[in-house]
């Protein structure tokens, strides 16, 4: 359907070297967009993502840096505009996750979580938004988590939950700040997803709990975030902004 066609669009995706970010980057190419990929220096998956996009007949640009580095993000966005001819779409997926009891959580661990998951999304939106606002057109999707709305039973991750709640409200704030200037900002909040972090052997038993507690009785695959992302970035969502789209297999219904 033409409403979901991203032909002629240029996208910038952070966290594009693995997991949800990688799947979405390739999915945007399948929908017709050229895609700039951003991840940490030395990320082994970036070239894999680039090759997958090229095999679908679209252009891909590899850029590297840390989302906590505003200068690196600005440089990557500038390269995107120079090499791919513009910037109209963005998906901010870069993030980290870990757990620790709140009473024992070192400040450094708290701070890094906030720096990457929340400040990193803000700095990404800022760099992307500056270009989009000049052109009066653009759409941004930030990846949060259902943990930004609920507290996961049995997981001690106050810092992670807080960072993702911040992403949701940051996105709504930007959506309203930029709504009259042609920029839409929305959120996808995944439920438990089979990212590389959740495929480690040491969390095999925990995965069984995640599956049991999800109404669909399974975890999502990263590819299941592609459709929601394409929708929110496309003309099909032209009247959608400031929305937190849960993709959680019904988890929050219980």
Image (cartoon, rainbow, N blue to C red):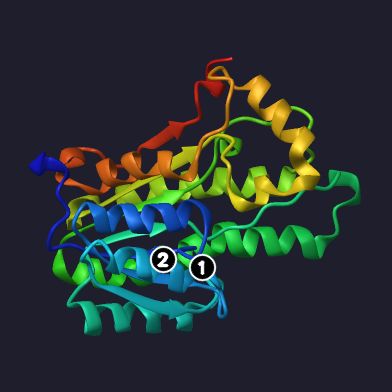
**Going by the image, does 123 lie left or right of 183?**
right
Q: Is residue 178 visible?
A: no
Mark 1–mark 2 CB contact (< 8 Å) = yes
Q: Position of residue 72 (x, y in %)?
A: 47, 82
Q: Which residue is farthest right?
A: 104
For the residue pair 136 and 247, the one nearer the viewer reads as: 247
Q: Position of residue 240 (x, y in %)?
A: 24, 38
Q: What element carries label 1?
A: helix
Q: Is mark 2 on a helix, strand or loop?
A: helix
Residue 247 image-quadrant placement: top left
Image quadrant in which the C terminus is located: top right
**Going by the image, does 224 lie left or right of 158?**
left
Q: Is residue 166 visible?
A: yes
Say few, some or many: other residues with alpha carbon within 10 Å of mark 1 (under 14 / 14 to 19 / 20 or more).
some
Residue drawn where x is 53% and y is 16% of the image: 253
Q: Which residue is farthest front?
A: 55
**Residue topped by disc 2:** 49
Query: What is the tally of numbered marks visible in this picture?
Result: 2
- Does 143 sit above or below residue 147? below
**Residue topped by disc 1:** 45
- Does 241 sit above or below residue 133? above
For the residue pair 45 and 189, the one nearer the viewer reads as: 45
Residue drawn where x is 64% and y is 26% of the image: 211
- Does 34 sit above or below residue 248? below
**Going by the image, does 154 lie left or right of 136?**
right
């Amino acid at each position: 359907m033409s409403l979901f066609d991203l032909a002629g669009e240029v996208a910038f995706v952070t966290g594009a070297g693995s997991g949800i970010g990688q799947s979405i980057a390739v999915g945007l190419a399948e929908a017709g967009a050229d895609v700039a990929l951003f991840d940490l220096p030395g990320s082994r998956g970036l070239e894999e993502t680039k090759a997958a996009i090229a095999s679908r007949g679209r252009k891909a640009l590899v850029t590297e840096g840390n989302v906590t580095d505003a200068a690196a993000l600005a440089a990557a966005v500038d390269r995107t505009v120079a090499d791919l001819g513009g910037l109209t779409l963005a998906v901010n997926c870069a993030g980290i996750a870990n757990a620790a009891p709140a009473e024992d959580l070192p400040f450094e661990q708290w701070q890094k979580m906030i720096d990457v998951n929340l400040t990193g999304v803000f700095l990404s939106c800022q760099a992307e938004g500056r270009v989009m606002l000049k052109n009066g057109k653009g759409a941004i999707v930030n990846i949060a988590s259902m943990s930004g709305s609920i507290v996961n039973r049995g997981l001690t991750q106050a810092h992670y939950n807080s960072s993702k709640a911040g992403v949701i409200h940051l996105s709504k704030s930007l959506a309203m700040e930029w709504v009259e200037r042609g920029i839409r900002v929305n959120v996808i909040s995944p439920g438990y997803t089979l990212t590389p972090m959740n495929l480690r052997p040491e969390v095999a038993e925990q995965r069984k709990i995640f599956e049991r507690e999800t109404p669909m009785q399974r975890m999502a695959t990263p590819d299941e975030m592609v459709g929601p992302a394409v929708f929110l970035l496309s003309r099909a969502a032209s009247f959608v902004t400031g929305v937190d789209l849960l993709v959680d297999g019904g988890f929050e219904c219980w």
